[in-house]
Image: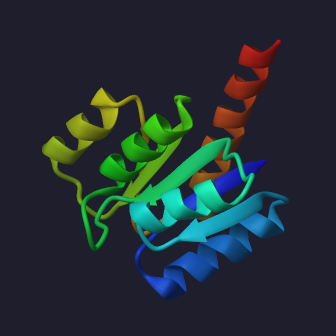
Amino acid sequence: MPVLCIVNEKAVLSGMEALLSGWGCAVRTAPSSQAALELLSETRFSPAILLADYHLDSGTGVDAVLRIRKALGVPVPGVIITADHSLEVQREVKSHELSLLRKPLKAAALRAILNQLSMRRQAAAE
């Protein structure tokens, strides 16, 4: 499954890439929404799922997912990962039909949500 991961912390980004690759995902990473958009315009990579940290250096993960969806013209499923437990963030994520995972991120929770999104994608394709 092709996954695009947007995280502004290099160590976290490489850890996510290793974890997701270990699960058989085709992973591309970017430290910002702008870098992600450049990656998508320069390659034929078409993500099935977007993973984004909520707090990026410029904007939020929600903003990044929305920009990428607009650029691709497809409502790619997105997962926002955050340590912010505020109701405001929860509402923002939910209002854009995104999934939410809290830090510290548990690998089992990430895997479960990826499986769930993958099954929805397969069902929609049938």
* x and y, in percent, of residue 90 in the image: 25, 41
> In the image, what residue occupies the spot 50% across and 57% down?
37
* x and y, in percent, of residue 73 in the image: 53, 30
> In the image, what residue occupies the spot 78% across and 48% down?
1
Relative placement, left or right, of 29 versus 6 is right
Colour mapping: rainbow
* x and y, in percent, of residue 57 in the image: 28, 74
Question: As displayed, is residue 118 above or below residue 85?
Answer: above
**Residue lying farthest bottom?**
11
Question: As displayed, is residue 10 above or below residue 64?
Answer: below
> In the image, what residue occupies the spot 67% across and 65% down?
28
Question: As displayed, is residue 71 above or below residue 15?
Answer: above
Marks counted in the figure total: 0
> In the image, what residue occupies the spot 81% across and 69% down?
22
Q: Is residue 108 shown to the viewer in this render?
A: no
**Residue lying farthest front?**
42
Q: In which quarter of the image is the C terminus?
A: top right
Q: Nearer the viewer, residue 119 or 32?
A: 32
Relative placement, left or right, of 10 versus 112 is left
Q: Is residue 120 shown to the viewer in this render?
A: yes
